[in-house]
Structures are given as C-alpha cells and as structure tokens.
Amino acid sequence: MPDDFRTLLALVAVFVPLSLLSIGGGASLLADMEHQSVAVRGWTTPREFADLFAISRAAPGPGTMLAALIGWKAAGWAGAVTATVALYLPSSLVVYGAARLWGRWRGSVWHTAVERGLAPVAAGLLLSGGIAVLRISPGGPAVWAAAIIATVLLMRWPRLHPLVLFAAGGALFGLAGLW
Amino acid sequence: MSEGVPLGGATAETGRAVREHHRVGLLAIFAAFYGLGVTSFGGNTAAWIYHRIVRRRHWINDVEFLSDVALGRIMPGSGGVNLTVQVGQRLRGSAGPVAAVGGLLSGPLVIVVGLALAYTRIGWSSPIHGVLDGIAAAAIGLTFATGLKLLPSGSARLGPLAVALATVLCVGVLRWPMLPVVLCLAPLSIGLALLQRRNA
C-alpha cells in the first residue's frame, strides 16, 4: 500500500510541473513525458511508450491523454486518474483565473479589439494544427488524399456529420489494410 | 466557405442572445462535452467544439470561440482542455469549467485505458493500423474545414486574412515555434481591429 501511494505521489511530482511548463502544448509535452517515464522513472520501456502513444492516438479526446496511460502503467486505475488530474488541473486553474480576469473587461473597446484581433491568428493556428498532424501521420499519400477529400466534403455540405466521415475513412483504410 | 457568416456578424448576436435568454444548465454542459469527448477522434478537440458547441448549439459565437482558442494555445496546458475551461466559464461561471472538463475527459479516460487493456490481449494488426489512418485522415479534414470556414472573408477583411495566412505560413509550413509567432502577429492584428473600429 505505501508503495502504491509513493508511485501516485511520483506521478503528481512528474505531471504537475509538465502541466505548468507546457506552453505551446503537444510536441514539447510529449518529449518530456517520454524522458520522465522511460529514463527517469522507469515506468515504461521505450517500446511500451511507443505502443502507449499509438493507443492514445487511437482513442478519442485530447492527444495528451497519453498521460493517463503512463499513470495506468505505473499504478493501475488510480494512477490513470492521478496522472490525468495532475496534468490538467494546474493549467486549467491558471486558464480559469485568466478567463475571469479577462471577462471583467467585457464590453470595453479594448476587450472587443483583442477578441477580434485574436480571431484570425486562431484560425491560422487551427489550420497549422491540421498541417502538423498530417506531417506526422504514418499513412503517406493515401492519408493526404483522404484528408483533402474529407475537407472538401465538409466544406461543401456543412451539415454532414463528421462521424460519418470518420466511420467511412476507418472502414475504407481498414479494408485496404486487410489486402 | 459556403454559408460563410462574417465574423462578428449574425452569429455574434446569436451566441449572446441564446445565453441571455436561458442559462445553460450544468448537466447540459456536462452532457454536451461528454458527447464530444467520446467522439473527438484525432485529437483535434477545438474543431469538435466548434462543430458541436458553436455551430449546433449556438452557446458561444465565432469571435468568442476564436479568441478562446488563441488564449488557450498561448497559456500552459493542452489547447483543447484550456478552450473547454474558457467555454465553461463563459457559460456558467465557476461551476461551468468543472462540468465541461469533467465531461470532456471522463469518457476518453475510460476508453483509452480500455484500449490499452485490449491491446495487451490482442496486439496490433494491419487492418487496425488502416482504421487508425482512415480516422486520422477524417480528423485532419475536419480541422481544415473548420479553419477554412473561420478564415476572415470579404474585401473589408483583407488585413485579418493576411494575418491568418501569415500564421499558417510561419507555424504550419515553416514550423517556427508558435509562441513567438503569436506574440508578434497578435498585437499587429489587435491594432488592426482597433483601427477598423475607429474608421467605422
């Protein structure tokens, strides 16, 4: 029992700093998680870490749910919950504080200008995120082509439910994998 | 960009009007984010939030959504979770983020560990890799379609469009670090928004 508890504390000690230092998200976070769980703490082997990464990409939810899997590997279900809370709670509190402060100026000229000014930057960031995922995707040209087709279909028919495309894409590429 | 609503146009009124007429319940917030959590394959939470919360439920408008996306990205933590915190706060003050983030993460947490358990039993096979590739492609398509729809359009919005394209070029194509790029382009874009307001 005390050993389990110590592992949970170690998970908190690893993921709380990651939560607060991971500005810019994604890639830098992943490298730090890998270093901590493989080299420093020995929770996973390099091979296991690669597998867990692949599993986390297959599941729905934020890409960083990989943290839950590292926690699970280290200390079972309690570890999964502990790692998730430790990774998301501290940064969420910071963002919540900022959002409240920010909301106080709602309606002022500055508030409106900042919101409108950030909008085009955010649209650019969304598109850049798509390009980044495309780049690391192992599927090659077939995935590029399918991504473009999905984009066109969604632009042409905005009412189309994205899950229909997800199911079609999964089925199509799954069948191709059977070949 | 079919049915492209100009930023701050019709939808700006819709989002606020819906919020003022009836406060969104905590259970409804939890349920909405739970639903999008368990279906948001491909890790692009923001695109799903746009589809489910902005487009379908009109709980917030385009400008609010984009502003939260930008602030969520430049603060520590996961962009998708940060966005969820901010949307929850807009909808329901301090309890909103708890309901929204709880809804967003509880489903995927169980699913991801379930997948890991299944994987230790059966392992990967090539059809499974194929299915994952197909889902990834659709997720990328959803992200692109969302980003393209939210690009500023119309002759009066050439400045903002240039800012958006510069962001794509620097971060997406040239792979420069996001934070300095945003810290350069955001003040420029905010200045533009102030100028346009003066002229209007």
Image (tube, coloured by chain):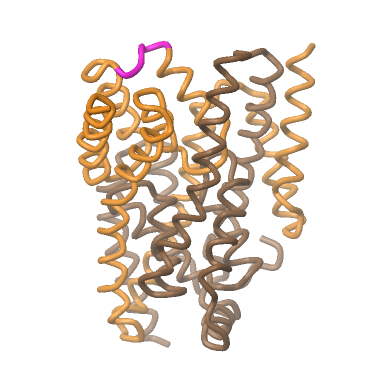
Residue placed most toward the observer, B69 or B180: B69
Name above or below for residue A139 compared with residue A133: above
* Percent of width and height locating residue A162: 70, 49
Q: Look at 51% across and 49% down and name the residue there.
A: B45
Residue A178's place in the image compared with B131, above or below, is: above
Q: Residue furthest front?
A: A1
Instruction: Tell how many labels.
Output: 0
Residue B153 within the magenta-colored segment of the rendering? no
Relative depth, front residue between B186 and B97: B97
Q: Position of residue A104 (x, y in %)?
A: 28, 81
**Chain B representation colour:** brown
Query: Quarter of the image holding residue B123?
Result: top right
Q: Residue at x 34, y 47 (%)?
A: A88
Q: Residue at x 57, y 70 (%)?
A: B154
Q: Is residue B163 left or right of residue B155?
A: left
Q: Residue at x 60, y 73 (%)?
A: B58
Please name the predominant secondary structure of the magenta segment in the image: loop
Quarter the C terminus of chain B occupies: bottom left
Which quadrant holds residue B190?
bottom left
Q: Nearer the viewer, residue A58 or B96?
A: B96
For the N terminus of chain B, the image quarter is bottom right
Which region is colored magenta?
A43-47
Q: Is residue B59 above or below residue B123?
A: below
The location of residue B78, given as percent across then percent down, is 37, 46
**Chain ID, orange in image:** A
Q: Position of residue B157 (x, y in %)?
A: 49, 70
Q: Is residue B137 left or right of residue B116?
A: right
